[in-house]
Amino acid sequence: MLELILYLFGLTMTSILAGSMVFFSCVVAPLIFIKLDGDTAGYFVRSIFPWYYLFIASLAAISSVSLFHRYFLEACILAGISAAAVLGRQILMPWINRCRDNMSADNSEAERSFKILHGISVWINVLQLIGSISVVILLGYGGYR
């Protein structure tokens, strides 16, 4: 019975993770830049992203722990998602912010670095989203075993 509860909990948390990432990427982020002026949007993004990464890391870690005993592949994917979110929050995001700050000083190297690092962060987020959706599919279609 406990294994079934852990399976359902892991599936639910992973579904919430995937749905939240889709909502943030497809609704929240575009609306920030559509509805807010540039400076306000930049300030808001800087204030929301640490929480976004923390949310992803936490949900993925909780899901991973709940599935680890019986769904090792799925748990490893979720652990990777969590680790990538922690690295994004603690290392990549501050680096991106420093480059963005240096861009205002008309520094073309900072602009180039910002574009590269931002692109990396986008690809990491896409891979995290693909991973979380994959786990939902594996758990949902594979069923409780």
Image: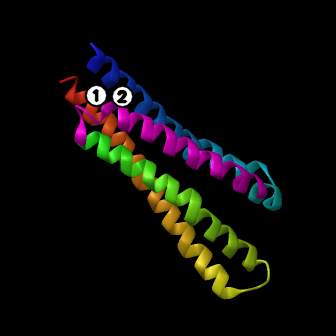
Identify the image quadrant of residue 2: top left
Q: Position of residue 53 (x, y in %)?
A: 56, 49
Quarter occupied by the N terminus: top left
Q: Nearer the viewer, residue 98 or 110?
A: 98
Q: Is residue 62 visible?
A: yes
Element class at badge 2: helix
Q: How many marks?
A: 2
- Mark 2 is on which residue type? Leu
102 left or right, relative to 136: right
42 part of magenta stretch: no
54 left or right, relative to 135: right
Q: Which residue is mark 1?
A: 140
Please tell me which residue is depicted at 78% across the width and 77% down the height of the picture.
Answer: 104
39 versus 105 height, above or below? above
Please tell me which residue is depicted at 24% across the width and 40% down the height of the picture.
Answer: 72
65 part of magenta stretch: yes
Q: Is residue 33 visible?
A: no
Element class at badge 1: helix
Q: Position of residue 76 (x, y in %)?
A: 30, 46
Please tell me which residue is depicted at 59% across the width and 79% down the height of the picture.
Answer: 113
Q: Position of residue 141 (x, y in %)?
A: 23, 29
43 versus 102 height, above or below? above
The region drawn magenta spans 43-72
- Asked whether disc 1 touches disc 2, contact meaning CB atoms under 8 Å apart, the reply is yes
Closer to the chain start, of discs 1 and 2, is 2
The local crowd at label 1, few if under 14, some if 14 to 19, many if 20 or more residues have their Cα within 10 Å, is few
Q: Which residue is mark 2?
A: 11
Q: Nearer the viewer, residue 131 or 59?
A: 59
Quarter occupied by the C terminus: top left
- Mark 1 is on which residue type? Gly
Assign the magenta stretch its main secondary structure.
helix
Q: Position of residue 23 (x, y in %)?
A: 55, 39
